[in-house]
């Protein structure tokens, strides 16, 4: 029986999302003869989110995911024999046997979530796990950004190179290389958040100093904002609120964002010098702030080693669905 649907699961430190994706057309020749837009082939028919509540432990996480999948399939009258598989995005490095080997959601480390979920669901089909930043860049690159580059600028998907950077609570990265995911041995290639950004800089939870994540994550921006405020008047504001304050010319917010943008340019230049990608796509909460893109190209141009044809810096096009959609694409394009 031909599969009609596929499930994507995106497990984050705070939320678990489940999407049911309908397969409307044959996708097998996607790389060589891609459609004009991804939604000719795939449609997200439902998305459901629940809190991860990681402090309640791993068995509870598996149970929640199994319940989400069962409820979503019942709601859309999708029986398991119609499922092409289940793809799972995990918030950390994923080994070849699809276990998460490091990440800040400790409850998931060294757990065989693929087997445990299959058992909980009594599901025998494809189940594939992957690092969430890899899922992000894969969805964006197989989606409309990559398709436009293929159709409108004549760069075939099979020759495209794209880097995805997630600027969120942490900082993650992934590489789309010639139509596939560049994974590294443990899906830990492009752990851009934990490369040395500032020598002997701020202490990182990974045990090293000066990691990129300590300068370019949402929490780094929040800390920087308070450093620019008088010591007697710290304010607990999230990144979006700091951007809103900067619009109103609040000096501490403006200073924190200027510093953030300076760091962002450094990272993007380093990534461009390293991978020479066609484009870099940004995801995560901070990527939604239009002001971070202002004069980015000019600022980068000054510092790039090769100044001809710099990569485009793109906001993501799939919004917050890129994680689940990328996960859903795993059983179809990556496999076990
Ligand atoms: Zn680190």
Image (cartoon, helix red, strand yellow):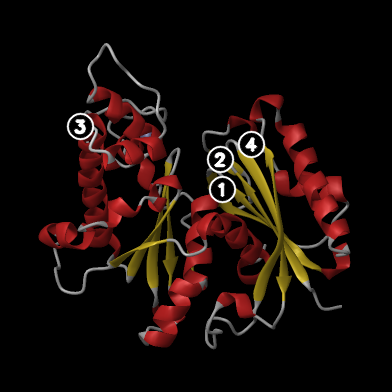
Give the CA distance from mark 3 to mark 4: 41 Å
Provide the residue designation for mark 3. Answer: 251
Q: Which numbered disc, 2 or 1, marks the residue that appears first in the sequence?
A: 1
Residue 304 placement: quadrant? bottom left
Q: Position of residue 299 (x, y in %)?
A: 16, 57
The quarter of the picture where the C terminus appears is bottom right
Whether label 2 touches label 1, CB < 8 Å? yes
Whether label 4 touches label 2, CB < 8 Å? no
Q: Which numbered disc, 3 or 1, marks the residue that appears first in the sequence?
A: 1
* Number of numbered discs overlaid on the protein picture: 4
Whether label 3 touches label 4, CB < 8 Å? no
Q: Residue at x 21, y 49 (%)?
A: 266
**Drawn side of residue 326 relative to residue 85, left or right:** left
Q: Secondary structure at mark 3?
A: helix
Q: Which numbered disc, 4 or 2, marks the residue that appears first in the sequence?
A: 2
Q: Secondary structure at mark 2?
A: strand
**Drawn side of residue 187 relative to residue 86, left or right:** left
Q: Position of residue 155 (x, y in %)?
A: 37, 83
Crowd around label 1: few <14 · some 14–19 · many ≥20 (10 Å):
many
- On residue 94, which mark appears? 1
Q: Position of residue 6 (x, y in %)?
A: 73, 65
Which of discs 4 and 2 lies nearer the camera? The answer is 4
Crowd around label 4: few <14 · some 14–19 · many ≥20 (10 Å):
many
Give the CA distance from mark 3 to mark 2: 42 Å
Which of discs 3 and 4 lies nearer the camera? The answer is 3
Give the CA distance from mark 3 to mark 1: 42 Å
Provide the residue designation for mark 2. Answer: 101
Provide the residue designation for mark 4. Answer: 108
Q: Up-down: is 72 above or below 240?
A: below
């Amino acid at each position: 029986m031909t599969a009609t649907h596929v499930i994507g699961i995106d497990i984050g430190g705070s939320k678990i999302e489940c999407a049911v994706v309908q397969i409307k057309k044959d996708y097998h020749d996607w790389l060589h003869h891609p459609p004009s837009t991804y939604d000719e082939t795939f449609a997200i028919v439902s998305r459901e989110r629940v809190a991860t509540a990681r402090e309640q432990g791993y068995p509870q996480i598996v149970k929640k995911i199994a319940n989400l999948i069962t409820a979503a399939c019942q709601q859309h009258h999708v029986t398991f024999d119609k499922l092409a598989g289940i793809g799972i995005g995990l918030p950390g490095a994923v080994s070849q046997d699809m276990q998460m080997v490091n990440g800040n959601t400790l409850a998931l480390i060294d757990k065989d979530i693929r087997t445990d979920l299959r058992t909980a669901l009594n599901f025998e089909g494809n189940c594939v796990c992957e690092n969430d930043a890899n899922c992000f860049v894969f969805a964006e690159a197989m989606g409309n950004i990559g398709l436009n580059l293929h159709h409108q600028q004549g760069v075939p998907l099979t020759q495209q190179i794209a880097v995805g950077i997630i600027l969120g609570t942490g900082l993650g990265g992934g590489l789309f290389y010639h139509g596939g995911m560049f994974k590294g041995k443990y899906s830990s290639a492009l752990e851009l958040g934990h490369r040395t950004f500032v020598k002997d800089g701020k202490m990182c939870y990974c045990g090293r100093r000066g990691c990129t994540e300590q300068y370019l994550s949402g929490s780094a921006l929040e800390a920087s904002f308070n450093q620019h405020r008088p010591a007697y008047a710290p304010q607990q504001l999230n990144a979006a609120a700091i951007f809103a304050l900067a619009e109103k010319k609040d000096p501490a917010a403006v200073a924190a964002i200027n510093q953030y943008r300076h760091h962002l340019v450094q990272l993007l230049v380093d990534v461009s010098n390293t991978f020479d990608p066609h484009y870099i796509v940004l995801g995560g909460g901070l990527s939604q702030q239009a002001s971070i893109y202002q004069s980015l190209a000019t600022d980068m141009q000054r510092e790039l080693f090769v100044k001809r044809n710099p990569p485009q810096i793109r906001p993501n096009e799939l919004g917050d669905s890129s994680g689940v959609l990328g996960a859903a694409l795993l059983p179809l394009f990556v496999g076990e």
